[in-house]
Image (cartoon, rainbow, N blue to C red):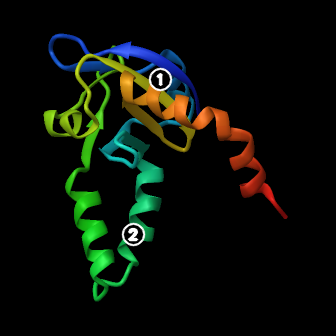
Amino acid sequence: MFYGEFSHTIDRKGRLILPAKFREAAKANFIEKFYINRGLDKCLFMFPEEEWRSQEQKFKNLSITKQQARTFNRLYFSGAVEMTADKQGRILIPQFLKDFAGIKRDVAIVGVSNRIEIWSKEKWREFYGNNQPVFEDIAEQLMES
């Protein structure tokens, strides 16, 4: 549903405009509400509500008697924020999430099928630069029968 890589900037009021292709995909799939939270690799994850609920169900089923499950759920859900884009397709990312991801002004917005990832432009370049050379090796390892 969400595919591609886009460069955007945070405006002086702290808002980020979602790429037109993502706004179109959301409209076509009747998505109004998103959940944004701390992701992995120092980026932010942004899920449509239905996908968020699916992820939430998986994590709620982790045993609360296991310390790692409690820690994961605390860290994961404590950073979650419900949001709706305004009429211009802008979202306001809370400062604590921008701090987590090292986002100041320039961002990379990346579509990863069922979610959107929001990266500081520098961190995305670094991640991409470090991983693109080994992309084929990763594909081979993951796709082995």
Q: Earlier in the sequence, mark 1 or mark 2?
A: 1
Is 124 drawn above or below residue 73 in the view shown?
above
Q: Is residue 1 visible?
A: no
Q: Is residue 33 visible?
A: yes
Circle 2: element type: helix
Q: Nearer the viewer, residue 49 or 43?
A: 43
Q: Nearer the viewer, residue 130 or 144?
A: 130
Say left or right for 78 vs 88: left
The kind of residue on which mark 1 rests is: Arg
Q: Nearer the viewer, residue 54 or 62?
A: 62
Could you say which quadrant of the image residue 98 lies in?
Answer: top left
Residue occupying the point 85% across, 64% down:
145
Name the residue that disc number 1 marks: 23
Furthest residue in direction right, as rendered: 145
Residue 59's tag is: 2
Q: Position of residue 1 (x, y in %)?
A: 60, 36
